[in-house]
Amino acid sequence: MDFSRQLIEWYMVNKRTLPWRDTDNPYFIWLSEVILQQTRVKQGLPYYQSFVKTFPTVQKLAAASQDSVLKLWQGLGYYSRARNLQAAAKQIVDDGLKFPDNYKDLLTLKGVGDYTAAAIASFAFKEAVPVVDGNVYRVLSRIYGIATPINVPAGVKEFKVLATKLLNNKDPATHNQAIMEFGALQCTPKNPDCCTCPFQMDCVAFQEERIPQLPVKIKKTKVKSLFHHYLVIQTPSGRTILNQRDTSSIWAGLFEFPYIESNGALLSNEVTEHEVFKEVTSGSRFRESGYNQQPIIHKLSHRKIHAYFWIVKVEEELIDAILVDDAFKKPVHVLMDRFMKEFWHRN
Ligand code: SF4
């Protein structure tokens, strides 16, 4: 089988028109690759367009405030991607605006791993390095019938060796785009379109009816439940309080209501007697006017967050309180975004 030729022939007929495919600007390619990690093209496209418009150059991204970068990222999740993007932009500016132009140097940028470095190096600089993302694992494991788990070092190595062997060294950019597009459109996780697939005759998974079993991934994350009791402070003038997360958490740099962490649901008096509550209300008289009995559940890869929102009306102004309009300008995580829009009736 001439894998690369068949793949590229398929790509030329089936590829989607996407803005980052019409450029060899490494900065735009990098932006698109970071945005599209863990994100579908349809969801990522408007974010890509906003980033290119707001930060058209690496310098602009490096010079922006972290809040403005996170605000633009809001809703995409995995916020470390946005923080790393900006940290790497600063690295490039500090290095005399020299954008790394090869796989090895690209790996020195913050947040740039094997996949992203290979994508930028091959798409922008035509370097012959294979990309291996979720799509590539799926396509190769099925066509070649490989059952080695994709998330253990031996599997990572085996697939990388195979991808390198199959790569079209004369046109690595098109080959890499093609294999990812093939995984996204034809050899999809569920219901792959095997009937019209050019690899059907050679595909081991198809021939041996093993498609649902491939690729193999070992489950190793144990999900932990967290209980957050958010204090939705309302002062007489309608202000509220938001705190910024510190740098050690997954939501670092994002804003949220002050909260109490517990091992489960709490009674009203357990909240109002908690030291976080006392500190936030600064001894002001308050009226706790109910809360959402049903927590909002938010699932992350390792965590399941049960978020309760307590409405606390204080009778005095608080020094750290801000206008609700200003709260809406802050970058917030998805749980906060959902609650704030519903509670204050904003879109
Ligand atoms: S035959 Fe089906 S499973 Fe095999 S590569 Fe084609 S689409 Fe994927």
Image: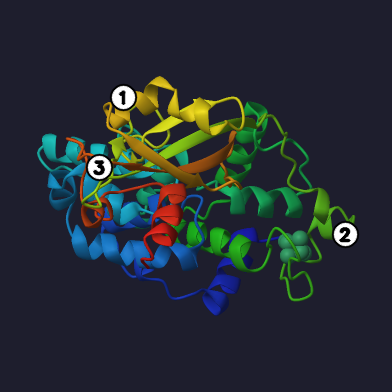
Of the image marks 1 and 2, the number of the one nearer the N terminus = 2
Q: Quadrant location of the N terminus?
A: bottom right
Question: Which residue is found at the position 29% from the left and 35% from the top?
Answer: 244
Q: Residue furthest top?
A: 275
Q: Position of residue 29 (x, y in %)?
A: 33, 57
Between disc 1 and disc 2, the foreground one is 1
On residue 124, the disc is: none
On residue 86, the disc is: 3
Question: Which residue is found at the position 26% from the left and 45% from the top?
Answer: 235
Horizontal side of 156 relative to 309 (left or right) equals: right
Q: Position of residue 254 (x, y in %)?
A: 33, 41
Residue named by callout 1? 279
- Badge 3 element: helix
Of the image marks 3 and 2, the number of the one nearer the N terminus = 3
- Local crowd at mark 3 within 10 Å, few (<14), some, or many (≥20)? many
Nearest the eye: 105 or 87: 87
Between marks 3 and 1, how big is the CA–CA gap? 34 Å
- Asked whether the residues under the numbered discs 3 and 2 touch, taking CB atoms below 8 Å apart as contact, a structural biologist would say no
Between disc 3 and disc 1, the foreground one is 1
Q: Tell me the amino acid under the disc marked 1.
A: Glu
